[in-house]
Image (spheres, helix red, strand yellow):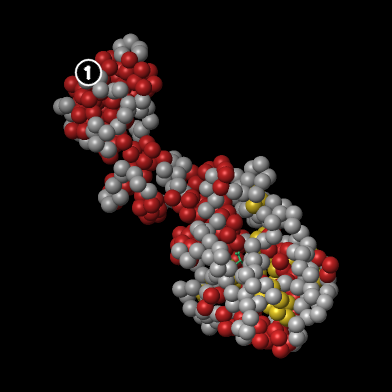
């Protein structure tokens, strides 16, 4: 059956990989069933809200190829899709609850902490709120709602156990004694996460809620609100936690955690999507490498696991290396340009022919960052690179004949050579053969001379890319002993 799913981020910064997984699974569920995927911005927690994060999150999703059918930038029947633009709607439902005797004002003056922030680890159970012995009357509460006094409105819990049927975690019961009357409207006039989330899921026709496990503990509040407001019960699928390799909560401490950081670091979106898809789900069997299209075909919620997922950065790097090797050049060019636009490198981004050449001669790269690391020096000024001392000693100073001696000979011959790959290639071969030198004995001194180091693409590619003039200028600089 077609499901309507949603991704409902609270904008506080770039999209976290955990959020990206939630978005991806919701997208896949919708695509798989021929349903609809909706994007809603939950910006009712004004203390944590970061306005610039909204376009950032949209850009991160688009980069991953996770497109939404309805929501921000894709208006539908149920908009607006930013909660801060829907305040009267929420107040209407709060009024309805008050009139039904299911909500009352309480005297908090300061804005209430928003329950969208999952309770700190270990802080289970009641939050320490005690229901007043004498509840305010309906009239007092309505007056507070209408602004007579700054007050929060709380939901009056019915005092019964709540069971959530979750597609992943099974039946989860939250007993009455672990519940307490919770805030639905804060004294700043904004609804809490729980109220706004429930109202919007109903009005926007959401039929399946798929989100991180940290929200499972909140679900009893939402279930009670749904019941009190006569709303439908959606399907739930909570996703396992994502941990680092040491089994701790994934955090910045051991590397990037935002989608944008991986983009900037030179990852391909298809590799990241493939990797993220496997954080808590697998298609069964040995299969791991999947395109978005294949993910849509293979995804099914009954293969989402309960146990914590491991964020294995080595595996992601391997995925990226493979994705880079498999992608066609046009695709790589688009992504490489994107990488260059986000990073300051010596490589000029405007020349498509040059970028294609760089992609070809750097085949096997792990991330795009490998390309400037290996080739960036070729685009710097001829006097603007440093010589690695170890490389100089090993390649130029030691040995018999020394690299310097070989280089001096090379300099003489290079000057008269036609500067094309085949000519340079056959010259290198002849030069080696005539002196019974191994390829390394010739290529490495050139490499150290023109790059300052022992890492660069194949020597012929390096020289062609650099051009005759720059090559000779660099060799001269090196022979003049300007290597320190
Ligand atoms: N706004 C919540 C968040 O920050 C949404 C949680 C939910 O999907 O219900 O992720």
Quarter of the C terminus within the rendering:
top left
Identified at 27% across, 50% down, the residue is: 351
In the image, taking residue 348 as reference, residue 75 lies left or right, namely right
From this view, report whether residue 279 is shown above or below residue 375: below
Is residue 430 visible to the viewer in this orientation of the structure? no
User: Residue 76, position in %: x, y?
Assistant: 51, 80
x then y, percent, for residue 273: 53, 55
Element under disc 1: helix
In the rendered view, does 235 fall on the left or right side of 45? right
Q: Is 166 on the left-hand or right-hand side of 290?
A: right
Q: In this view, does 326 lie above or below 387?
A: below
Quadrant of ligand 1 in image: bottom right
Of residues 198 and 23, the one nearer the viewer is: 198
In this figure, which residue is indicated by the disc labeled 1?
A: 409
Q: Is residue 228 above or below residue 299?
A: below
Q: Position of residue 280 (x, y in %)?
A: 66, 54
Furthest toward the top, the residue is 400
């Amino acid at each position: 059956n077609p499901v309507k799913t949603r991704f409902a981020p609270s904008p506080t910064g770039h999209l976290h990989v955990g959020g990206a997984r939630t978005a991806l699974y919701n997208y896949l569920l919708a695509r798989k069933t021929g349903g609809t995927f909706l994007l809603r911005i939950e910006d009712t927690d004004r203390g944590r809200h970061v306005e610039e994060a909204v376009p950032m999150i949209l850009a991160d999703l688009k980069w991953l190829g996770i497109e939404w059918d309805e929501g921000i930038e894709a208006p539908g029947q149920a908009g607006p899709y930013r909660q801060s633009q829907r305040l009267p709607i929420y107040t209407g439902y709060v009024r309805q609850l008050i009139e039904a005797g299911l909500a009352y004002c309480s005297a908090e003056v300061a804005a209430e902490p928003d329950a969208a922030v999952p309770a700190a680890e270990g802080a289970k159970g009641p939050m320490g709120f005690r229901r007043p012995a004498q509840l305010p009357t309906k009239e007092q509460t309505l007056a507070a709602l209408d602004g007579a006094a700054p007050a929060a409105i709380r939901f009056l819990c019915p005092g019964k156990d709540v069971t959530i049927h979750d597609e992943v975690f099974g039946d989860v019961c939250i007993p009455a004694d672990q519940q307490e009357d919770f805030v639905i409207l804060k004294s700043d006039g904004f609804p809490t996460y729980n109220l706004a989330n429930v109202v919007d899921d109903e009005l926007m026709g959401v039929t399946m809620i798929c989100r991180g496990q940290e929200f499972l503990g909140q679900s009893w509040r939402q279930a009670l609100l749904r019941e009190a407001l006569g709303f439908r019960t959606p399907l739930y699928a909570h996703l396992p936690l994502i941990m680092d390799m040491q089994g701790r909560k994934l955090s910045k401490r051991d590397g990037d955690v935002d989608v944008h950081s991986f983009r900037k670091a030179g990852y391909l979106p298809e590799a990241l999507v493939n990797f993220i898809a496997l954080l808590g789900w697998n298609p069964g069997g040995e299969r791991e490498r999947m395109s978005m299209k294949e993910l849509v075909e293979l995804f099914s919620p009954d293969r989402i696991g309960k146990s914590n997922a491991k964020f294995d950065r080595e595996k992601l790097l391997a995925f990226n290396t493979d994705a880079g090797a498999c992608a066609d050049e046009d695709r790589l060019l688009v992504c490489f340009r994107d990488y260059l636009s986000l990073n300051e490198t010596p490589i000029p981004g405007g020349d498509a022919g040059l970028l294609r050449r760089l992609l070809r001669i750097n085949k096997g790269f792990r991330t795009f960052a490998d390309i400037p690391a290996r080739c960036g020096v070729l685009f710097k000024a001829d006097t603007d690179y440093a010589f690695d001392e170890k490389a100089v000693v090993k390649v130029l100073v030691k040995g018999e004949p020394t690299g310097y001696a070989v280089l001096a000979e090379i300099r003489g011959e290079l000057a008269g050579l036609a500067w094309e790959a085949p000519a340079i290639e056959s010259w290198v071969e002849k030069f080696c053969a005539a002196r019974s030198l191994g390829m390394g004995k010739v290529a490495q001194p050139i490499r150290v001379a023109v790059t300052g180091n022992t890492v660069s693409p194949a020597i012929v590619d390096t020289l062609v890319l650099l051009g005759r003039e720059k090559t000779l200028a660099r060799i001269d600089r090196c022979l003049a002993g300007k290597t320190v």
